[in-house]
Amino acid sequence: MNWLLGALLGLAALAGVLVVLSRDPKKQVYALCANGLVLALLFFALQAPDVALSEIAIGTMVTPLLFLVTLASAAMHRKQP
Amino acid sequence: MSMLPWCVAAWLFGVGIYGLVTSRHYVHMIGCLTVCQSATYVLLLGIGFRWHAGPPIFYDHPPGTAAVDPVVQALVLTDIVVGAAMTALLLAIALQVHKRRGTLDPSQLRPLR
Amino acid sequence: MSARARSALLVLAFIVLAPAVASVIRAMPPLGQPLSRYGPTVNALAPGLRNVSNMVAAVNFDIRGIDTLGEECMLLCAVTGAVMLLRGRRGEDMSERAGRVPGRAIVRRSDATVLVCRFAAIALLLFGVYMVLHGTVTPGGGFQGGVIAASSLLLLYLGEGYAPWRRLVRGPVLVVLEAGGALAFVLCAAVPLIDGHAALQNLLPLGRWKDLYSGGLMVLVNYSVACAVAGGFGMLLLEFMEETRAPENDPEPDEEDV
């Protein structure tokens, strides 16, 4: 249990760095998905199933989708002022 | 090990701030903000955690067995959902900026002109 | 401020704040030995007082119910703000078709994808409803269940494409869900006040332990939160999708709309 928590905490720190360092927003969306998934696993390990469920739904589905739609809309309407 | 969660929380917050300051794209900036948010989740859940305790749900094990703190979990739970709605609000603002100015680069936008 | 100056300021701030952060980290209790008595007290008392087995739901919907009411209002405000911003300058010169990013190839969905997405969307919706119904018993509740139910809309979008999806999803239904959920929460808090009790006081029968109906008023609050969250996130998805429509003067519809 000890090593599992430690490993997941390390992964969470790493995933945060990935999100920040992926400068292209399109690539950052995937980093965000990974970040959400790692955080959800960490919350499971911290005995918080409720929080993990909401983090899976929000962090890996809803938020990345909103980012993608925003980027798509910005790319679509680039030509117009 | 006993200090690790606090270090990770501080690290995530610092990394998020670094991303916010050096960002060249509004959408990227909002992603960095979610990293800052995740620091608070790690901190709060770490505070409520207890060794050799189960989740605070007494369905399979009877009430009275050791369980982690439910109050911080309730805080984080609502924070995640409301935070996502806030992220959506920020993205809507970014879209407005793009419609009016045609760019998403913060350095090309002067606030007062 | 130039990028260089900003970075310098950031480094300076990190250097100044680092000792403070380090001392705070040193002063924190070690992991796994919480100091607060609040949580253990809730764990000890709430199962007997409220007949519920999910302590997180008990904290959210009863013990700290007013906080959740505040959070709910924040959610409502954020969703309203986002919808207003998106609708504000959209105008009417948008077609009813999905737009496309210039220079990107259009790949037709296979029938298998459409079918799998339909099944998965229904399964996800059912799972969300299941989580809401069992909110006070097992992990789950209005917040998670609402979000999961709303994200079934997203799977439906992946399968169907914009135009059929838009015919399926009705904006007013989502608005009524969201506003009605928030109103129901406020009523749950306010009705006990009329009779001279505290806000959100549990006046309903508490129900049976491990039953779908357990926790009295908590169940109603749970359902209203679920409606509000599902409606709010459905609304957000819908309004963001509206942003991806093609402009009116765009050339001919492509394969994707069929």
Image: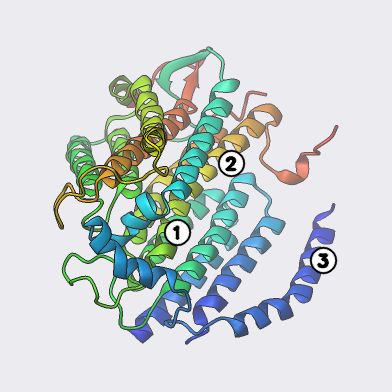
Which mark, residue C8? Answer: 3
Q: Which residue appears at 74% of the width and 73% of the height?
A: C17
Query: Mark 1 to mark 2: distance in Å?
Result: 20 Å
**Left or right, C111 with reference to C55:** left
Check if mark 3's residue and mark 2's residue have beta carbons within 8 Å: no
Query: For this rendering, which residue is in front, A1 or C201?
Result: C201
Q: Chain of mark 1?
A: B
Q: Is residue C252 visible?
A: yes
Q: Chain of mark 2?
A: B
Q: Residue shown at 40%/75% (left/top)?
A: B49
Residue projecting furthest to the front: C196
- Circles 1 and 2, Cβ within 8 Å, touching? The answer is no
Identify the residue under disc 2: B90
Rendering coords of residue A4 (x, y %): 35, 81
Q: Residues within 10 Å of mark 2 (few under 14, many from 20)?
A: some
**Same chain, marks 1 and 2?**
yes
Nearer to us of marks 3 and 1 is 1
User: Closer to the N terminus: mark 1 or mark 2?
Assistant: 1
Tell me the SS state at disc 1.
helix
Q: Is residue C42 left or right of residue C54?
A: right
Indicate which disc residue C173 carries.
Answer: none
Q: Which residue is depicted at the point 47% across and 58% down?
A: A31
Check if mark 3 and mark 2 are on a common chain.
no
Q: Secondary structure at mark 2?
A: helix
Amino acid at the residue labelled 3: Ala
**Residue C89 versus residue C190 in the image, above or below:** above
Name the disc covering residue B76, or none.
Answer: 1
Q: Amino acid at mark 2?
A: Leu
